[in-house]
Amino acid sequence: MAVASIKEIKQKALEELKAISDLSQLSEYRVKYLGKKGVITLALKALKDLPPEERRILGAELNELKDFLEERLDSLKRELLLAEEDRLTDFDITLPGRRPEIGTLHPLTKTIREICDIFLRLGFEIVSGPEVESDYYNFTALNIPEWHPARDMQATFYLENGALLRTHTSPIQIRTMLQRTPPIRIIAPGKVYRCDADVRHSPMFHQIEGLMVDSDVSFADLKGILTYFAKETFGERTKVRFRPSYFPFTEPSLEMDISCVICDGEGCRVCSNTGWIEILGAGMVHPEVFRAVNYDTEKWQGFAFGLGVERITMLKYGIDDIRLFYDNHLYFLDSFKTL
Ligand code: DAH
């Protein structure tokens, strides 16, 4: 071995050292130069064949190179390990974030809130009542005695103890009038139950009841307030019409229709080509109802109304199957996020 070849080894070793960029290259390098059959190890072994003077000089040089490389490789290994760790725990700040899924109000809740808001602006107050009702509040006090055929209009779920699931929100009228003295302006949203099920009917659905009692409430107030409600809910251009009807708890009774929201009154499938859609029942509070709550019929008059929340929501959004409200499929619920 000559001095020149040791210089060459050193030069190549230092050059290759600079090119190491990962841990596998580093261990290859260590084997190549410092392993059992490594370039430096073999060169050190070859020293024994040299004359003493040369052996001393070249030996010192080779050992110095070996020590230097060992130290360099150790520190380089630590650096590369740290870099690797960084790389694994690092995250790319340019990646778009994951949006948290945000829920939305159920369409029925939306409608209930919108309708309540309209009546709150008119000075009405929100009240509620129990879903398990007595026969008395649900029927009798509303002028629907035991023998009355109007009980057939509402297929009722009776409980074993004689109580029932309220078939409408009207019993809240009775409860409110018993608790308070006029003037009364209340609106009462809630669940009601009837033994009925198809694409338009569900055994549980929602109604909103309204009641206004004062010393000079007239049929004109009823028409004015319900017309305002219809235009606020379905749009300013909405037309309304009042048809005579029958409810045991009002006299006179009426049903209110709005001009069809789909065809604007032209006639279509939704309005059965009539151009009109029924949206609520109403009337002047029947004297028998006032008598049931001990109100002086000479002193007080009032009007009441009841509407179906599902029906109004279906009309507002063009939904044709009531069951969509209760299935809670996200694709259905999500479609109300932007509305
Ligand atoms: N309770 C009636 C029903 O469920 C709706 C109704 C009609 C309520 C007329 C009223 C009213 O307060 O005056 O069909």
Image (cartoon, grey):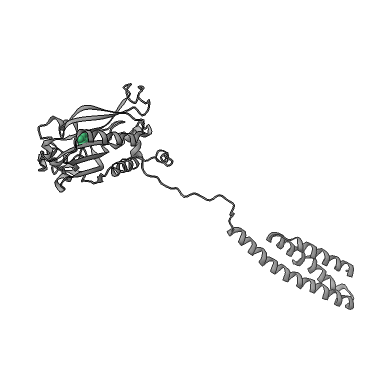
Which of the pair 287/147 is nearer the observer? Answer: 287
Where residue 246 sits, quadrant-wise, is top left
Q: Residue at x 82, y 76 (%)?
A: 60
Give the residue displayed 40% in from the left and 45% down from the top: 104
Coordinates of residue 52 in the picture (x, y in percent)? 88, 78
The structure residue drawn at horizontal position 15% and vertical position 48%, both measured from the top left corner, is 179
Task: Work out whether 334 lies above or below 14.
Answer: above
Q: Count how many numbered circles sit on residues in the image.
A: 0
The quadrant in which residue 115 appears is top left
Image coordinates of residue 165 in percent, x first then y, are 20, 41
User: Residue 20: in sight, yes or no?
Assistant: yes
Q: State the residue at coordinates (69%, 60%).
A: 22
Residue 209 falls in image quadrant:
top left
Report the front residue among 191 and 73: 191
Residue 132 in picture, x, y percent from top left: 19, 44
For the C terminus, the image quarter is top left
Q: On the picture, is 240 further left or further right than 216?
A: right
